[in-house]
Image: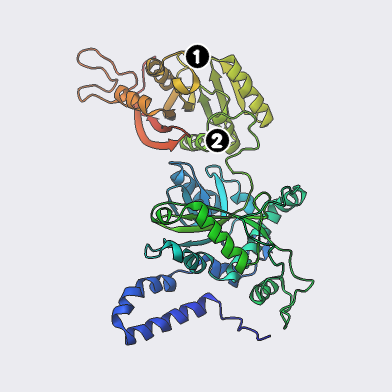
Amino acid sequence: MRQRHPSINTAESRRKRALCWQLHMKRRNPFRFRKHTARHNLLLRETRVEDLMAEHPPVRESGGLSVPLRYYCTAGKGMEQFLAEEVHLKLSASDVHYVSGKVFFTTSADIQKVVGLKSAERLFLLLKREAPLSDTWSAGQAARVVQERIIGEHQAWSSALQWWQNLRQALGEVEADQNTIRRGQKRKWFEGEGPLPLAPPPGVLEGERHLAGAPASEEGEVTSTQKPVVTFRVCCRCSGTVARKLGSQDLGRLIGTAISRQLRWKVELREPKVEVNVHLTDDHCVIGMPILRLPLAQRCYIRTTGLRSTVAWAMASLADIKPGSLVLDPMCGVGTVLLEAGKEYQGSFFLGMDIDPSQLEKASENIRFAELSNSIELLQSSVTAIPSPSCSVEAVVCDVPFGRKFSSRVEAAALLPAAVKEMGRVLRPGGTLVLLLSPQLSILLDSILSPSPTADCLGNQPGGDPRPLPSLQLSATYRVGLGATDGLIHKYRKMPQCDTRT
């Protein structure tokens, strides 16, 4: 069998071929050259992630990976900025940028650190991120577009699979896959499909033997070093122009057909070994493999869930908690904010309060389950009468309950002014107040704390109408998704020169 040159598929060779093509087209047809030059300039400027994976075999080293890998995480609404800052600080990541719902980054940090991200929903190994599909193709040309733009070269997929397997092996996920009981093997992916051949074509065999270090057979026969067939399923999402031409289900079927034919992977919907996620929009085309089966947002140390854990972590990160600080949550509920803060800032102390004893019981169970009893204390109390001295805590973090969501009999709007005033009383000058509010309560709080042009430092009006807490200065506001509704995170700083009178 004729052997291919080892450097024929390298990134450098592709860039050289693209440059030769540009010079040829510029001499032959200048108009056509100008029409297509943008696409090939992008090829010359960017080193695609599949090139990096294909040219560097996956070798583990102590303390990290031999080559930085490209990841992306999904994030809830409004959480992209928090996640981008987290990967910068914790992973020393580079090439960090985000779009709506996704954060892309490159890092060589150990995978154990990567899966420790707190503001991410799910973690993926990035296979491809390219420009959006052009709108010039029709539904009849979809198979060709999928083959050229989405699938591409099989060597990149084989190398990405090797990286993915190494990452999962480092996390112990391989044993979990082997212990999974497979069911429903008779289920067909789509009607009319026969059994897939187990022997991949010669090109795939060469790529797999190259990665595994086994010699290629001249006749292209299946040897004992060939790896078992890979089972997979495709999860496809599309929007915009692509969705108007072809639905997500039809496009996912085309992508799955192309993968099974070219890569010789076998379709398995119920218990696949690999899940391929494809997201096509008018802005980008993203393909990745989820590294973990469960979302990162599903905390193993929380027994009874309340507030979304990623939002609770974001609130704690805004509180500027330092070692030895005392942090108060006067409406702690089941303690989600306390748990996230306690896990992230283990050198600090936390005090949770709630007027509902049933909520405190659930919070106590969560604290014991998370093994944070040494740093978190609970106390039954009303938010309008906090049993703490004035200026006694460095930070106050509170998820103000929405009356409709929590079936509260107390009108939240009537309770808010007195609650915020009491929080400001126990907060030290220079401390931080972080509140999660509904959009309606956010507007109300802004009107309450808005300074008047004629008010003095203590908020006294000429007519005698004092402001409840003029010392709180708004630092930032973040809008985040809470599922069916949105919430706004307000961050306030208590000004030291304008302390409230007690």
Image side of residue 274 versus residue 471, left or right: right
**Position in image of residue 14 (x %, y %):** 49, 78
Residue under the point 67% across and 77% down: 202
- Kind of residue indicated by mark 1: Ser
Q: Residues within 10 Å of mark 2 (few under 14, many from 20)?
A: many
**Residue 232 visible, this orientation:** yes
209 or 378: nearer the viewer: 209
At which x and y percent is residue 404?
45, 21
**Residue found farthest to the front:** 192
Q: Would you say residue 63 is visible in this rendering?
A: no
502 or 225: nearer the eye?
225
The N terminus: image quadrant: bottom right
The answer to whether 226 is drawn above or below residue 374 in the figure is below
Residue 309: assigned label: 2
Circle 2 SS class: helix
Q: Amino acid at mark 2?
A: Ser
Q: How many marks?
A: 2
Q: Which residue is mark 1?
A: 382
Separation (CA) of disc 2 from disc 1: 24 Å
Q: Residue at x 66, y 24 (%)?
A: 365
For this orientation, the residue located farthest to the right is 224
